[in-house]
C-alpha cells in the first residue's frame, strides 16, 4: 500500500447528529479530487453514539478510512495531534466534523497548496455563527495579533492544509497545551491563506462554551508569547513610578497646606482598582506556571484506546493499542 497523497483529519466529539451528513458529503468530495486519500477520524472520547457510527463507516470504506478512538476527551487540538502522528499523506487537511467547513473546499485548499506553499490557512467568507461567537472571536483575534507575531486571518477556522514537513515539526513539539494553526505558522516557510465558505452547524451544538473558549485562547496566548507577562511587569513599573510621584506630592502638600483627611473613598477606589490588576497579574502568572507544571509532569497528552485501520494485505483488522501520545 503506497502512501496516500492527502490525509484528511477530523476530530469528533459528540457529533452523532451530523456524522451521517458528513459521510454523505465528504467521501464524494474526496473521490472527486482525483488523488489518493485517507480519512482519519479521531473520536475524542464522545459520550454519544459517535464511536459506533465511525466504526460502521470504517466497515463501509475500510480502504480509505482510519479511526482513532481516544479513551477520554482530550480536546480538539490534542485529538488532531493524535491523528497527525499517524497521518501518511503528503498533505494533511484538518476539518471540523460539523460541516461548518464545506468538504468541497478541500479542492481549493489543495490547489493553493500545489502553488508551492507548505501551509494553507483559511478565512471564513461569511461567518455563520451566533452574534456572541463572532464578536468574541474578533476581539480575541485582535488581542492575539498584538501579543504574538502570528498572523492568522481567522483563528477559528480549522479548514487548513499542512505539508508533511510541517506536520513532522508539529509532532516533534510535545506540547501539552497548544494551538495547531499557530504552531504550523511558526514553522511554515511559505504560508498562504484562502477564503472559504462557512455554513451553519449541520446539527448538534458547539462544543465550546465561553469557558473552554477562554481556556483555548489562553493556550494560544501563553503558548506563543511572553508579551502578557512583560506587559504586567511594565505596568507594575509605571504604577510604582506614578505612586512615587504621588507620595512626593503628598509630602510637599502636607508641609505647605497641612494634613488631609478627605477623599478617603477616592483612595479606596484607586486601591481596589489596583488590587484588581494585581489579582489579574497573579492569575496570569498562574496560567504560565500551570502550563509549565503540566509540561514537566509529562503525562500522556491523550490515551488511544484502539485504532481501526486496514492492514496492508489481509483486509481489515482492529489493532487495540494501549499506546499514548508521548
Ligand atoms: N471537538 C473535539 N473535542 C472537543 C471539542 C470539539 O474533538 O473537546 C471537535 C468537534 O467535534 C468538531 C470540532 O472539534 O468537529 C469543532 O468543534 P465545534 O464545532 O464545537 O467548535 P466551533 O465550531 O463552535 O468553534
Ligand atoms: Mg463548529
Image (cartoon, helix red, strand yellow):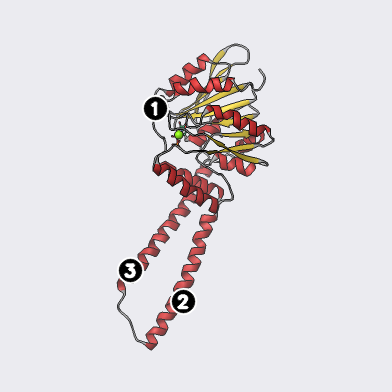
Q: Which residue is mark 2?
A: 245
Residue at the location (50% across, 43% down)? 294
In the displayed structure image, the side of residue 111 where residue 60 appears, left or right: left
User: In terms of sequence position, does the residue under pointer 3 or pointer 1 come before the other?
Assistant: 1
Report whether residue 79 is seen: yes
Give the camera-side residue of 36 and 266. Answer: 36
Query: Within the displayed image, which quadrant is ligand 2 positioned in?
Result: top left
Q: Position of residue 212 (x, y in %)?
A: 42, 41
Mark 2 and mark 1: Cα distance apart in space: 60 Å
* Label 1 residue SS: loop
Q: State whether residue 320 appears in this view.
A: no
Q: Is residue 2 left or right of residue 58?
A: right
Residue ID for mark 1: 47
The picture places residue 17, in percent across and down from the top left corner, at: 40, 25
Residue extending farthest to the right is 116
Q: Residue at x 54, y 47 (%)?
A: 223
Amino acid at each position: 500500500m503506497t502512501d496516500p497523497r492527502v490525509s484528511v483529519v477530523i476530530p469528533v466529539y459528540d457529533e452523532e447528529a451530523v456524522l451521517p451528513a458528513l459521510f454523505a458529503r465528504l467521501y464524494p468530495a474526496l473521490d472527486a479530487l482525483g488523488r489518493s486519500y485517507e480519512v482519519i477520524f479521531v473520536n475524542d472520547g464522545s459520550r454519544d453514539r459517535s464511536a459506533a457510527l465511525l466504526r460502521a463507516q470504517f466497515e463501509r470504506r475500510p480502504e480509505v478510512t482510519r479511526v482513532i478512538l481516544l479513551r477520554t476527551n482530550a480536546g480538539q487540538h490534542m485529538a488532531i495531534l493524535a491523528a497527525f502522528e499517524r497521518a501518511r499523506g503528503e498533505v494533511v487537511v484538518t476539518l471540523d466534523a460539523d460541516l461548518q467547513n464545506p468538504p468541497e473546499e478541500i479542492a481549493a485548499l489543495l490547489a493553493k497548496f500545489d502553488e508551492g506553499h507548505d501551509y494553507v490557512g483559511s478565512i471564513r467568507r461569511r461567518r455563520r455563527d451566533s452574534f456572541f461567537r463572532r464578536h468574541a472571536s474578533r476581539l480575541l483575534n485582535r488581542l492575539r495579533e498584538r501579543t504574538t507575531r502570528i498572523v492568522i486571518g481567522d483563528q477559528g477556522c480549522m479548514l487548513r492544509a499542512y505539508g508533511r514537513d510541517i506536520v513532522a515539526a508539529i509532532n516533534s513539539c510535545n506540547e501539552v497545551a497548544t494551538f495547531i494553526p499557530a504552531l504550523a505558522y511558526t514553522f511554515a516557510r511559505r504560508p498562504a491563506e484562502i477564503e472559504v465558505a462557512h455554513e451553519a452547524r449541520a446539527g448538534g451544538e458547539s462544543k465550546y462554551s465561553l469557558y473552554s473558549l477562554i481556556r483555548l485562547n489562553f493556550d494560544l496566548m501563553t503558548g506563543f508569547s511572553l508579551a502578557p507577562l512583560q506587559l504586567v511587569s511594565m505596568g507594575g513599573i509605571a504604577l510604582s513610578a506614578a505612586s512615587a510621584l504621588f507620595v512626593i506630592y503628598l509630602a510637599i502638600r502636607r508641609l505647605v497646606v497641612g494634613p488631609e483627611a478627605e477623599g478617603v473613598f477616592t483612595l479606596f477606589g484607586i486601591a481596589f482598582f489596583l488590587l484588581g490588576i494585581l489579582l489579574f497579574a497573579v492569575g496570569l502568572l498562574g496560567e504560565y506556571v500551570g502550563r509549565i507544571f503540566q509540561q514537566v509532569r509529562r503525562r500522556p497528552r491523550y490515551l488511544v484506546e484502539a485504532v481501526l485501520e486496514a492492514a496492508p494485505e489481509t483486509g481489515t483488522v482492529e489493532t487495540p493499542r494501549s499506546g499514548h501520545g508521548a
